[in-house]
Image (cartoon, rainbow, N blue to C red):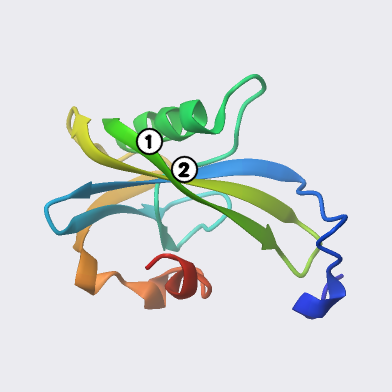
Amino acid sequence: MFKQLTDIDWTTWTPKEKATLLFVLRDNQILLIHKKRGLGHGKINGPGGRLEPGETPRQAAIREVIEEVGITPLNVSPSGELLFQFCDGYSLHGYVFTATDFQGELIVTDEACPEWFELDQIPSDRMWPDDRFWMP
């Protein structure tokens, strides 16, 4: 559907879905997940997912972290918004959050395998190609 960025009219662009990413930070590390299913299957990313009806982006971000890796993020702050337009027509408005603390113990779920990475060793070669541009 879209071949290049100039094909998109951003003044009328509307996302098909809204979703979140929440990056938990500790010391000099970031919590990322290896996606086991769904959008981004096989890639490394932050925990997150689609908003459910009636949820705020912050509520959805916290819920998704709990569901995907078993911890409750604390000191959650908004960090940005992203507009993703895929070539096949799928589009997504992403709300990005960070957390500086958490409660609980990490678990592996059907959706994700969590892993801590040093901030200077983020595996961008295993992530979405555009992550290396906006994540820093």
Q: Is residue 67 above or below residue 29?
A: above
Q: Mark 1 Cα within 10 Å, few/some/many (few <14, many 20+)?
A: many
Q: Inspect the image, locate mark 2, and give the three-letter code of the amino acid beneath it.
A: Gly
Q: Decide which of 39, 122 is in the foreground and name it.
A: 122
Q: Position of residue 47 (x, y in %)?
A: 40, 45
- The answer to whether the residues at label 1 and label 2 have Cβ atoms under 8 Å apart is yes
Q: Position of residue 69 (x, y in %)?
A: 31, 37
Classify the position of the N terminus by image quarter. bottom right
Q: Decide which of 27, 41 is in the foreground and name it.
A: 27
Residue linked to disc 2:
48
Element carrying mark 1:
helix
Q: Earlier in the sequence, mark 1 or mark 2?
A: 2
Residue, far top: 54
- Using the rendered view, name the quadrant where residue 74 is placed: top left
Q: Position of residue 106 (x, y in %)?
A: 21, 37
Q: Position of residue 98 (x, y in %)?
A: 35, 45
Q: Mark 2 Cα within 10 Å, few/some/many (few <14, many 20+)?
A: many
Q: Residue at x 44, y 51 (%)?
A: 36
